[in-house]
Structure formats: structure tokens, C-alpha cells
Image: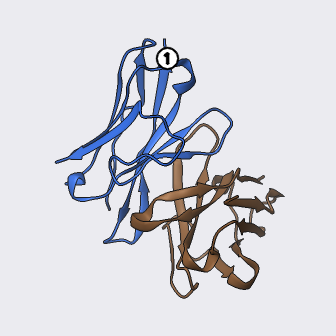
Amino acid sequence: SYALTQPPSVSVAPEETARITCGGSDIGSKSVHWYQQKAGQAPVLVIYYDNHRPSGIPERLSGSNSGSTATLTISRVEAGDEADYYCQVWDGSSDRMIFGGGTKLTVL
Amino acid sequence: QVQVVESGGGLVKPGGSLRLSCAASGFIFSDYFMSWIRQVPGKGLEWISHSSNSGTYTNYADSVKGRFTISRDNAKNSVFLQMDSLRAEDTARYYCARVGADGKADVWGQGTTVTVS
């Protein structure tokens, strides 16, 4: 079955750039979505179709997807960006929603 | 505004049953697939089931297949998850989510907690 791999944690200083990767077989051929989940809250969609932002999501968050890796990039990181981030695809062969294991972003 | 609200969680003994509900508002419910996604405390997100917009087609994760049943009532803008033969490992927060094009979960509820003990 299809699987997505994320690093368990990423740490970055304020104002720096955080990059969170999501690996999967030929993931570049799929649409990747990203969710942010702050402590005690429900997940929120922050990037869809690889690199589109829903309304209200700051431009500091961006996405890319090519080959076997999708990446969520957060520029000028703020304390408020500290959260768990999950990548997700729809696996057409199994007709299932697949989530990565999640990455905890820590702002130093 | 566009929202979904879950209810029905609680404490149940192993082997017991529970029925979760999700009430949607602010959008044309019958236009969308709906999913249930759960999260064990301290762990990641796990998709467990979805229903097509008409309810005709459903699918389940292997971990719940044969025990959980998803259904929907488009007249009442609601989707349900009937959970039978519950196990301790089903203890989690259960989220209802609207599924948009290309399988993105673009609207989430706050979740409802199920404890099997």
C-alpha cells in the first residue's frame, strides 16, 4: 500500500526558513495536501494541490512537489507556526486518503 | 459559515458499540464526499472511512473494515459512523471532514473523543 514518509521533527529559529519534506513513490504525479495542527486543535488545511493556499493562509507558507518528494516551506518562521504538520494524498489505486506520519515543527 | 460538528463520543467497554454523528452546514452537503479520520492521543492522523456524495460508495481502512459502517442522510446534512465490536485500540479522537476535489480534507470538525476501556 502507498506510504508517505515525514521526518518526526524539524527545528528552526525565528525568522529562518523551515522545510518539511514528505516522501513517497512518484509523489510528484499526485496532488499533495498539507495540514497544520496546533496543540489541542483540529487540523487545518494550509496547502492543497501541491502549492495552493486556502484563503486566510499567509503567503509565508508554500509547497512544491516533484519526483519522490513534496516539500512544505515556511518562510520567516514565527512562534505561532509551532505545530504538527501532515502531508496527505489520495491513493487512487486503493481509493483511500493517505497521511504522512507528521512532523513536529519547533521554533527555537 | 461552512462547518461540520461531531457528536456521539464517549466511554464504552470493549466489544461495545457507539454511533458518531456529524452535522454539516454552510455548504451543499450532497455535493461532497465525507470522511472520518481519527487520531490516537499523541499520534498521527489515520483515515478510517469515506462516503461518496450519494452514499452509494463507501470505503474503509483495514483496521476497521467489518466493524465500522459509514452512512449519510443528505436530507439532514449528516454523516454517521456506526462503530461495533470496539477495541481498546479504537480509543482516539474522531474527526469528520469534508472531502474536496483530489481528496483534500478542506473542512474539519473539532472532533469527538471515543474511549474504549
Can residue A47 be seen? yes
Q: Is residue B100 above or below residue B46?
A: below
Q: Is residue B72 above or below residue A36?
A: below
- Mark 1 burial class by Cα count in 10 Å: few <14, some 14-19, many 20+: some
- Chain drawn brown, letter? B
Q: At 52% across and 79% down in the image, what residue appears?
A: B52
The chain holding disc 1 is: A
For label 1, the residue is A107
- Spot occupied by residue A65 in the image (x, y as percentages of width and height): 25, 46
Q: Is residue A48 above or below residue B54?
A: above
- Whether residue B68 sits left or right of residue B15 in the image: it is left
- Spot occupied by residue A33 in the image (x, y as percentages of width and height): 40, 51
| Quarter of the view holding residue B25 | bottom right
Instruction: Kindly give the residue lying farthest to the bottom in the view shown.
Output: B56
Quadrant containing the N terminus of chain B in the rendered view: bottom right
- Whether residue B40 sits left or right of residue B33 in the image: it is right
- Whether residue B76 sits left or right of residue B63 in the image: it is right
- Spot occupied by residue B57 in the image (x, y as percentages of width and height): 51, 84
Can residue A25 be seen? no
- Chain drawn blue, letter? A
- Spot occupied by residue A11 in the image (x, y as percentages of width and height): 42, 18
Q: At 52% across and 39% down in the image, what residue appears?
A: A36
From the viewer's side, name the closer residue of B109 and A68.
B109
